Structures are given as structure tokens and as C-alpha cells.
Image (spheres, rainbow, N blue to C red):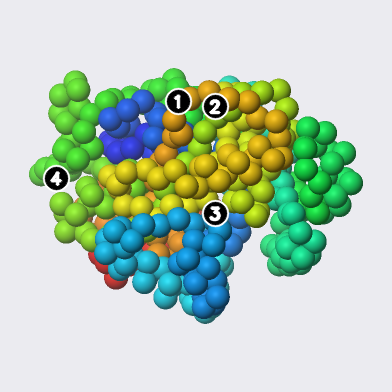
Amino acid sequence: MTTSIVLGAGMVGISTALALQETGHQVVLIDRKAPGRETSYGNAGIIQTEAVEPYAFPRSLAEIVRVGLKRGNDTDWRLGDMPRLAGPLWRYFTQSAPATYARTVAAYSKLALRASDDHARFIEPANAGDLIVREGWRAVYRSPGKLDAAVATAERLKREYGVPSDVLTSDELAASEPALKSRLAGAVHWTSPWTCRDPGDLVSRYAALFVARGGKVAQGDAMSLQQTGAGWRVLSEGGNLTAENAVVALGPWSPMLLARFGYRVPMVFKRGYHWHFGGKEGPRISMLDIDSSALIAPMNAGWRVLTGAHLAPLGTAPASRQIRHAVSAARTLFALRDPIEAAPWSGTRPCMPDMLPVVGPSRHKGLWFHFGHGHQGFTLGPTTALLLAEQVAGNRNNPLALPLLPSTRDWA
């Protein structure tokens, strides 16, 4: 039986462990924390099958100036962080050129469109159906002009990819969301995505399924990974673990580990923030206020208010501007009560300049890459895990009908 170590117990890592297990591997999943306690805990909980086009770097001068001057709440940055981010951001800008971006979308869209089907193979066996809501989510607009532009985009995505959506007028939105305090122009309701009422718990249940099927979860230091004559070794609390294969699924921490093996991964780090609030009156389904980049999601723990992206390297101090603005905007929409936690949560999204996750073999025998999912690790984890498992098994015919994503670029 082939043995494998998976480093990282977020959605991407646990999905990798399950997929390898299904192909007959004996798998150990290792992380410093329990499954689903890092980046996979702090997201909007949306399996975004509508997200067929990843976030590109702005190409117009006006948009770049807007972000540079922080005229909006979708992006934040600090001048002192720019020297560490400049190289990856420049790559991000060049990879967002129209021709290159079109090739990215051609591959990325195939992943997103099947994401819920790939989650479904784990949700029922993991007894996690109570966490899943199959009602989509809404983007709401305060001005008719922005709503009209969004409707045009939604119609294009429906035409080009078959992504379903409904348009709600101001009256229809008010009727559908009786707790809404403000009169808005309307909404685009993305009807195909599934939402999760506790993303961290979903990962935990996937991990429990992995253990029930014979897998092992161990706490340990992924940074202790070493190549041995027979494969790979890592130090856990129970001692050394060895295996033929090691899969790096550490999200934003992947570049730190891989630097020890000669890889210089040009990752773009985007931090996100959330805060839970009490109260009985919130959105019936998840709602994104486009003007404030504030997403309000109904969770088991309360109303989760989430922000846009803060460009910030790992280890830098959190900022408060985005979450303060997001909470203020959310309270103009709903009667949220006091926060449940003492302070907001923050976590880092591992984004690659070409907007594609890194999935496949490295230069080192038995060392595999599975990271860089950007904003969509929660969505795409099971899909790209199945793709990786096919490659580890040596199947190059790709029966999944998915694009073989490049596992290394010019940084390898």
C-alpha cells in the first residue's frame, strides 16, 4: 500500500487526504492545529460554483488609482508592506492581461462549475448535510447604475458558462429579506452555490470521515519535513512519521516550507477579516453589499460579517479599517447586536499571480504541491484534490475531464 503524508488540515488538505485514501493510499494528515482551525475557518462558507472568473488585478488606470488611494473598502494595503509584495503583485498584474487571463479562465471555470458535485461526495458520508444550505447568495446594489452593470455581467456568465442567476428588483428584495432596514436598488441572486453555516465544522466533519475510513490525524510541525532515502519524514507529537509521498497543502505557509527545498513561490497574500454578531434580525441567505464590500452570512455562531482583501504578508499586524467599515455598513442594513467575540478574526488567503491553484508534482520525487487557491480554497479543495490524486496515481489521461494545472511555473 502506498503511504502519503498530507501537510495542512484545512479544506484543501483534508480533501487531499480523502481523495488519496479513495485511491488506496494509507494517509497521515498533519497540522499544528486541529482540522479547519486556520484559514478554512474564517471564510464566507460559500461553495461558489458561480465564481468562474477569478479576481484579476485591475488593468485600468482609474481602477488602479482608486485602489491606490483606498477609495473603497474592497482592498486595503500599507506602504511598509509593499517591498515584500511588489514582486508577486507585478506578476499578478502581468498575468491579468486579457490574453493570459482568458487562458486562466478557460481552466479555472471548469473547476468552479463542478465544485458542489465534488463536495457532495463527502457531505453525505460525513453526516454534514445539516450545515449546508442550497439557496445561493445575493449581491445587493445601492445604485441602479451598478445594478444594471451587474445584471449585464450575470447575463454574460449565464450565456457563456451556464451559471444561473435571478435579478431582484427593490421591491422583490425587500419582500425576500424582511429584516432589511434600507431600501436598495436590487440584487443579483446567484442561485447555484451552496452555503455552509459553519465552515470550520464542515472541515472537521470531513476529517472525522477520513479517520472513520482508516486515516490518521496527527499534530506536528510541517516545517520539520525532510527528504529521506525512502521518501519523506516529518516530526509529530508521537514521533517521526515517514511516507513515500508528501503533499504540501499549507496554504499561505507553503512558500515558507518550500523555500527550504529551493522553491521561491511568488505568492500574493490577501488577508480577510470577520466578526460574529448576535441578534435575531439578519439576512435570510448570505448577502454581499457591493458598495461596502461587506458580506453578511448567517452562521450557527451568529451573523458573520466579512471584509474584502487586505494585502499583507504573513506575520504582519492586523488592521481595523476594513472590518470597521464593513460592520458599519452591515448595521445600516440589519439590526445586528453586540459582537460575540472580543475581537475580529483574521486569516490569509494564498493567491497565485496567475490565479490558478498549484496542483501536481514538484522537482523532488514524492513531493507534491496542492496550494494557492486564493479566495476559493473552501470551494475548490475537493475538486483539485481529486485531480491531484489522479496524478499521484500516475493517471495522465485525466478521466475527470479537468485541466492539468501547472504544478510549477517559472519560479520552480
Q: Earlier in the sequence, mark 3 or mark 1?
A: 3
Q: Which mark is residue 342?
A: 1
Q: Position of residue 350 (x, y in %)?
A: 39, 51
Tell me, yes or no, whether the two marked residues, 3 and 1, touch with CB atoms within 8 Å: no
Q: Residues within 10 Å of mark 1 (few under 14, many from 20)?
A: few
Cα distance between the residues tagged 3 and 1: 22 Å
Cα distance between the residues tagged 1 and 2: 7 Å
Q: Earlier in the sequence, mark 2 or mark 4?
A: 4
Relative vertical location of residue 69 with respect to residue 387 in this rendering, above or below = below
Label 3: element kind = loop
Q: Nearer the viewer, mark 3 or mark 4?
A: 3
Q: Quadrant of residue 29?
A: top left
Q: With 92 as the anchor, is 223 left or right in this view?
A: left
Disc 4 marks which residue?
227
Cα distance between the residues tagged 3 and 4: 44 Å
Disc 3 marks which residue?
73
